Image (cartoon, coloured by chain):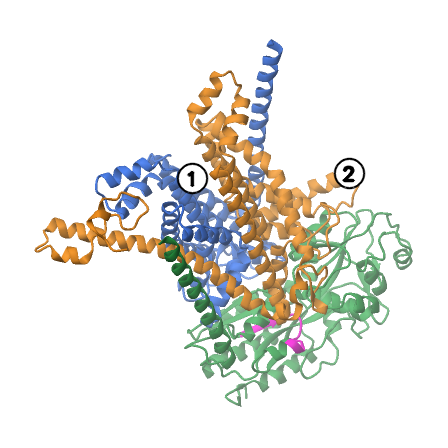
Chain colours: A green, B blue, C orange
Amino acid sequence: MYTRKFKSLLTASIAVAILGSVTLLSCNSGGSGTGTGKADSTSNGDENTVMGAGSTFDNPLFSKMFSEYNKLNGLKVNYQSIGSGGGILQLTNKTVDFGASDAPLNGKQDSGMTAPAVHIPVTAGAVVISYNLPEVKDTLKLTPEILAEIFLGKITKWNDAKIAKANAGIKLPATGIIVAHRSDGSGTTNIFTTYLGKVNEEWNTKVGKGSSVNWPVGLGGKGNEGVAGSIKQTPGAIGYVELAYAIQNNMAYAKMQNKAGNFITPSIASVTAAANITIPADTKVSLTNTEAADGYPISGLSWVLLYKEQKYNNRTLDKTTKIVKLVWWMTHEGQQFSAALNYAPLSPAAVTAGETILKSITYDGKPILQ
Amino acid sequence: MSTKIKYRIGKSGVFQGLTIAFAFACVIPLIAILLYIIKAGATKINWHFLTNVPKPVGESGGGIANALLGSMLIILLASIIAIPIGILCGIFLSENKKSKLAYWSRLCVDVLQGIPSIVIGIVAYFWLVKPFGGFSAISGSIALAIMMLPIVIRSTEETLKLLPDSLREAGYALGLPFHRVILKVIVPCGVSGILSGVMLSVARIAGETAPLLFTAFGNPYLSTDMRKPMQSLPLLIFNYATSPYNDWHDLAWGASMILLVWVLLLNIFTKLITRKWKVQL
Amino acid sequence: MNTSSLDNTLITRNEDALRVISLTEAAAVPKATKREKHTYRQIGSERNFRRTLTAIGAAMIALVLGIFITLIIESIPSIKSLGIGYLWGKTWDPVRDIYGAYPFLIGTLLTSFLALFISIPFSFAVAIFLGEYYPTGWLPNLLKNTVELIAAVPSVIYGFWGLAVLVPIVRSFENKIGIEPAGIGIFTSSLILAVMIIPYAASLGRSMIQMVPSNLKEAAYSLGATRWEVIRSVSLPYVKSGLFAGVLLSLGRALGETMAVTMVIGNTSLIPKNIFAPGNTMASVIANEFTEADHPVYLSALIELGLVLFLVTFVINLIGKKVIQRYTNE
């Protein structure tokens, strides 16, 4: 008796589970695929709220910009720093109005989207090489070759001949090098590995570039905190963090040799200089290993991602206009807040490229900005 | 002979000492954590901190009112969902010790407990966020409710199992129907155990970030609409503690301390209740 | 389950039929008195209550199966492209789309069992102290509440504390024994985990030990046994299945723990060489890389990790059940 009852109940619950999850999951693909979804799919019925998600790197700057914009226009922008990949995913699923990413969409991500998306550069940042050598008072100089070999695990002592050669006059200790890197997928890692891939062939073939890579050596720390903790606490450690993080936390960081052969201290000015190059029409350009003579080589742009055609999920013209105007403001008036937070303001070339793209955004086929 | 006895007594004493030492050593990390958090967080907390929303970087001041309110609402809804279901399921498991359905149900509860919170978050995202086209506090609450369930169920089951059968039989002998025996006799007798399970579960979900990341999502403004994204304390700590700016670190430390104190008070409050009702097992 | 008057006289607690009166019988009674109506209502709600309970029990199975199916559906892309080799693939390289879960399986098992190993003396000490030596009094009460509080501290706070306080201590220890003084690694995360899982085994163990019938212990005392001998030969054997269940509960928690571990384990996808080396657990990989997983196979490889974790906990729980069953049957 019991077994039969049990069996029927078990069958029932299995059936419920299968049916339930299949329905939910199938309506996932159906809903987002056609873009018609249910009623109001942009999660915010209320016209005065804009939802954004993505890059953690942009978050402090965006919070400042959106708070100022709220004072001006009363528009509430809810931006959540869930990571660039997450931002792209949410934009693909159309659960947010805009995404923000430290890396441009690659082919795979582009093909995942149901409609073309555009990139508008909003700010630029730098990745600095920070180290912990209590004995060394002067600023270290690093060449691309040294950096790549340290992160490949080929240079393992601080008094290695190559480092000594680049830093003549500095007495280097014989301590071992402990490499620290970000463990969580991040735009910072993407910029850093892209740079190493460009300057070092072995890195390019062995490790490659990406938000998360298979590190040959080193300790992974979660977030800026994790890496900074490892660097600060471990004598002999070297790692990479965002410029703002290094400045705010008084960490020592190295001068990097750029493509022109100059040793450049990372700063807002040298990052803006790095960004002052010819920007292609789609703005998908990497600033790493910049041609600019006084530009810091490990820097990168950060983008806001929008669908080119803004009419989807029952969005009104009024709302989409607000979104496009917001991004316009961010690339113009909004730039004044960058420097105070250690972000590099956009170069004029980048702003112009962004303007052209914003003007090309349409609602029902008609451009939103005239 | 007497040396043998002395040896045995000595051995007993040594083990008693060791047990006491080990038992109290457990407390050291907790005290260290408390001191550490209080040192970092206490100076940041004031009335302004509790009643304002966060300011952007570069502006001092600002508070965590949105996260406090959001956390409370999300946890409240999660508790409303999880506690009745959890207790009923615990009753089911304790009343049907031998049935096959209960065996599998119990196994599922154990498995549920082992699923990492981020996986629950992913599943909740695919179930509740993607099909309905947007993030919402409700989806966060449901994700947290799923996390609460195993703790509530297990503690209810374990507590009720310990109650003597005679209690139940006395109820039946008086002609009480099954549900009244359970609800009026068994559950009140085990209420302290059940409550401690509920408390444990609330405390556990109060600090969970991962399930909320893709469900409740966060919100820089004060919001009470459960159908919209909502901020919560762990999300705020997670976002601000990893940022480079000191203003935000201060917010994160203050919030950490409030989260800890909240959990602490929850514990003490529950202890007081169970003591007052004198329902110690 | 047709009822006859004979069934009603059967007093078996687990039988549904206990006091169910068939409808026809009830209808045959001409005017039901108020009292009788009340009784019928009670019987009706009793049946509903039982049904609700069963439904909720079944709902738990449905919930877990639902999660399981969702995980499977979402990991299909990676199962398709990687196959079963995923499990023992030794490389995890998102850039080249090579995903192997082996290093994380090792990392997870290593951290969890090491943590269990470290925490058992402490949690059993608490259980014995509170259950046997000093069951009442303000100090034991304080200890009991404090230990329970350990479970309440959010794991992200453990992580930050571990990074700031525990890591330097481990580093200086590593310096002394002459290995690379990284500080973070599998050993450190096991320490943090050990602290976090103490309360689970301790509280269950305590309530179990308190349940040991005092006449058993008194008998042992009257034979001249010392305190320790009573604990070792009477109390502990009596509650061993309970203690074991507590340990399993701890293990379940340790396997799935995410944030605290992620912050101190040193996250590397290489297979750990020793217990001080950095490593990665399945949960920590998901936490680290999920937000930036930017193409379908990568994302579903991470979800498949979740699926593997799910299955591992399932198997461990199944084993635990069997062991407990055998103990309780003895």
B220 lies above or below A134: below
Q: Which mark is residue C177?
A: 2
Image coordinates for residue B80, horizontal then vertical, percent:
37, 55
Q: Report the residue at 58% width, 85% height from top.
A: A359
Q: Nearer the viewer, residue B176 or C273?
A: B176
Q: Categorize mark 2 by other alpha carbons within 10 Å: few (<14), some (14-19), many (20+).
A: few
> Over which residues does the magenta segment extend?
A98-108
Image coordinates for residue B162, horizontal then vertical, percent:
39, 38
Res A297 seen here: no
Q: Which is in the foreground here, disc 2 or disc 1?
A: 2
Residue at disc 2, secondary structure: helix
B115 lies above or below A105: above
* Residue located farthest toward the top when viewing the structure as drawn: B2
Magenta segment includes A203 = no
Relative placement, left or right, of C303 versus C103 is left
Q: Report the residue at 75% width, 63% height from top.
A: A266
